[in-house]
Amino acid sequence: MRYATKIALRHFLSNPGQTALLISGVALGVTVFIFMSALIGGLATLLTQRTVGSIAHVTLEMRERSPGLIQPIEGAQLTVQKDLSRREQIAVWQPFVPLMEAMPGVTAVSPQIRGSAFLMRGQAIAPVGVIGVMPDRLSAIANISAAIVAGEDRLPSDGILIGKKLAEDLGLYVGQAIMVRSDRQRERSFRVSGIFSLGIASADRQAVYMNFTTARALFDLPSGISRFELKIAPVTDAPRQAEILERSTGLKVTAWTQDNAQLFEALAAQGRTGDIIKIFALLTIMIGIASAMLLSVMRRRSEIGIMRATGVSRLFILQVFVLEGTLIGAIGGMTGALLAWVALMPFPPIAQAPSGSLPIDVGQGGFVIAVLLTTLAAALASIIPARRAARVDPVEAIGQ
Amino acid sequence: MSTEALVRVRGLVKSFGSEESATTVLHCIDLDLFRGRLAALQGPSGSGKSTLLNILGTLMRPSAGELCMMGVDLTKADDAELTRFRNRNIGFVFQFHHLLPDLSAQENVMMPAASAAGRETAAMRARAAALLDAVGLSDRRLYRPAAMSGGQRQRVAVARALINEPALVLADEPTGNLDRESADNVMALLERINRDTGTSFLISTHDDRIAARCNRQIGLIDGKVVRDTEGAFSEK
């Protein structure tokens, strides 16, 4: 094999112009492969981050109780109606918090009081969803602290945080008093502590954050909570974590993926499109290398003939040409990877990318796999030309 | 001279084309080649010289007949066996040198040995250097073929044919592409190697001067042996 490598290397170096052209073609294909991987991977990361950045990855709630059935009476019409006067709550919740926080992959746990309410200011009324959180866990799920555009991210017992669009709709500003009436018909006056902007229209228009203890009183939940919201890392692990939590708590557990199936379909479709582009890039490389190797075999026909005449085996000839193709693939692949790296360097990380720019994730470029696949593809592409070389008839080839 | 036949050919026939329109190039050739002899194969173009050399060199299979070399029946050997046999026991010198352009003179000489071993060894390098010295090219060891004259290239080809110390060297018009002086030098080289090492040579040539320097002349016309100065089956 060592001597076959030497001969392959000599072939490789014998025509620098042609070799450079061939390597450039392979390198270009590899650059496209890596660029597409980085772009499609980056786009998926961006979409996922945008989607899951401000929502809970796993939610735990009490299971809904089925209304009790009574024995039907003959001739009577029986209507079963759910008891809406009773709020579903997790009555015993404190022991779960440290257990869930200790689970590997769980990065944040937020016990919450949830309910519907109206915000009233003079004649203006707006329906909102109230989220009662512990002040020290305010940013556990959505990063409210980072999204504050006016006021501060504190939650005193009489303070609330409202979204920017809601503030605009009601003409509210920081420090102003506002009345909140819950769906339990309890009312209380609050002061706007801060205004946030998450960039999600529904949250910025309808979400209101208030102190956990205050929310208890407003929604008639003296001891229980409405739900737990959890953050998971990595986010793709959420379904598995949800299964574990469901088994261990007996609660109704929902992973973010269940509510975002369309996103996954879109990401999968996007991934498939990227795969097709990458496959075509690899096929182009393979066809290019196979063509070049066939030409090389034609050009070196008399050399192959003389080698065969002097007793060089078919296997040796096969090895030389497969190695030559593999060498072209490996060097072209590495050159392409280097070019792609240089081309991708100016792109900032996705988290810092300005709006409208290409979401490139260099880490998902698949540099190593691109070089390995190209080398493998080149070796495979060389087999047919190499077999043709090995079958050269020495008598015909040297014209004797 | 040894009395043992190095090559034994009996009833050798070579035809080309399909059965209905076959062209027979060699007709029932009987021939013995002996160790240590320098034989010339003469005949006009199309007489079958090259075909006979190709068959003797195991590059081509006969249509019929028997070919034994060093006691081995080569007509029954498969391609891989023939390739190994050729590599170890037969050297070739062609009209055109057919050196590999990407290798130096020394690397070209080593090629048949190195390809069989899978690597170049110090012993191969030493033998290649000695052969290049023997053909008067020790100062051209590292030259590529493109940097050498036609005569020098042909001498490198002779050295290459000898690297595996073959029992038989087949030379097809080895001087046909050279000027008179280079041709004489190459022929003198073959004579010297034959004398010094006892390597057998069968040289195909149109040149009567070259043939006259050999110690046996075999004439071939229309695929038949028409003249053999040592007789076809004589025990030497």
Image (spheres, coloured by chain):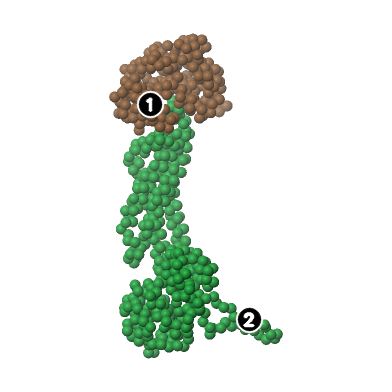
Q: Which chain carries label 1?
A: B
The residue sitting at 32% across, 26% down in the picture is: B141
* Foreground of the two, A257 or A200: A257
* Foreground of the two, A17 or A128: A128
The residue sitting at 45% across, 55% down in the picture is: A276
- Per the image, the residue denoted by label 2 is A69
The residue sitting at 38% across, 43% down in the picture is: A328
In the rendered view of the protein, which quadrant contains the C terminus of chain A?
Answer: top left
Q: Position of residue A263 (x, y in %)?
A: 46, 66
Residue A334 visible in the snapshot: yes
From mark 1 to mark 2, how far is it between C-alphas?
A: 99 Å
Quarter of the image where one finds residue B172: top left
What kind of residue is marked 2? Answer: Leu
Which chain wears brown?
Answer: B
Q: Which residue lies furthest to the bottom in this view?
A: A122
Q: Is residue A73 left or right of residue B113?
A: right
Residue B207 visible in the snapshot: no
Q: In this view, does B148 lie above or below A116?
A: above
SS for dot 1: helix
Q: Where is residue A257 in the image (x, y as percent from the top left)?
A: 48, 67
Q: In this view, does A108 lie above or below B218?
A: below
SS for dot 2: loop
The crowd level at tag 1 (other Cα within 10 Å; few <14, some 14-19, many 20+) is: few
The crowd level at tag 2 (other Cα within 10 Å; few <14, some 14-19, many 20+) is: few
Q: Are marks 1 and 2 in contact (CB under 8 Å)?
A: no
What kind of residue is marked 1? Answer: Ala
Q: Position of residue A267 (x, y in %)?
A: 45, 63
Which chain wears green?
Answer: A
- Per the image, the residue denoted by label 1 is B123
* Foreground of the two, A72 or A219: A219
Q: Residue furthest right?
A: A74
Task: Find residue B199 and name its label.
Answer: none
